[in-house]
Image: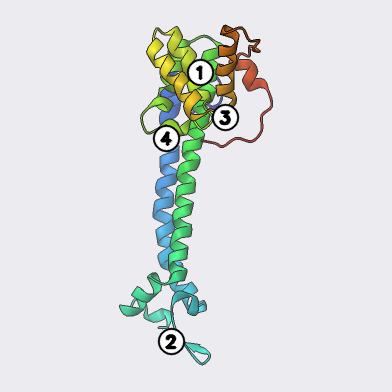
Amino acid sequence: MPQNLSDPPVDTADVDKRMRKLFMVNGFFLSLTLVVIPILLIIFQPIVANKYPVAFGYATVGKHATITPLKNYPSGRDVTALFTSPASIALDLVSAGAIMFVFWRGVGKVNGLMMGYARSFMERKQWSDAATVLASFDQSGQHFLDSTGEAHYMLVQAYKMTGKPKSSEKAREFVLKNRAKSEWAAKFRADDEGRTGGTPTAVSISETNAKPKGKKRRF
């Protein structure tokens, strides 16, 4: 894997090479999480249930809980009560949240790198490479990955420079319609004002990304 994944790539072949290795790393950690968390739940739920029996759905008689001693697990009804209790379900939800965190963290890492690569290609006027990298943000069902509209903003220029005016206009419409409050939609509206006699301020992609910005969502 390259020493620094954020370094500008040479071309799309270089991007593919980096992404394959990154997916392997992310896939390994996600698979590890999917295996480790269920094992930990199986091991520790009976232990925690013995310590906090009421929370795991067991009634109490006086000061004592009606719970099977840990050494006797598993034992049919007790196991069912254990793994369907409110506390057990809560632990399951936490574990599911941990798995989804690992998954979306990986997605955010990939998307962040792809955006950085696209900016690099745009600044070097490698329009075809930029369009290829950004195409994933323009697929049906994946538009949500472009939460700010920046990917489609760059796609407008990339498509236009590679002779795809219809795709360029479609990307522009997406930003104006679905990311209407974003800075990228504002730039398109400024361009429109300029064509109709307004006085827009021209800002290049490289200048825009050089400016300090507030905290944004990762994807």
Relative vertical location of residue 205 with respect to residue 88 in this rendering, above or below = above
- The relative height of residue 212 versus residue 9 in the rendered view (above or below) is below
Q: Nearer the viewer, mark 3 or mark 1?
A: 3
Pointer 2: what residue?
66
Which mark is first along the chain, 4 or 2? 4
The reply to whether residue 9 is in sight is no
Disc 1, SS: helix
Disc 2 or disc 4, which is closer to the eye?
2
Marks 3/2: CA distance?
59 Å
Residue occupying image coordinates x 41% and y 23%: 16
Closer to the chain start, of discs 3 and 4, is 4
Image mark for residue 154: 1
Quadrant for residue 164, please give it.
Answer: top left
Q: Amino acid at mark 1?
A: Met
State how far apart marks 4 and 1 are (Cα).
25 Å
Residue at label 3?
A: 181
| Residue 23, label in figure | 4
Picture residue at 45% right of the left edge, 38% below the top: 25
Label 3 to label 1: alpha-carbon separation: 17 Å
Disc 2 to disc 4: CB gap under 8 Å: no
Q: Which-is-in-front pick, marks 4 and 1?
A: 1
Residue 169 percent across, percent down from the top left: 43, 15
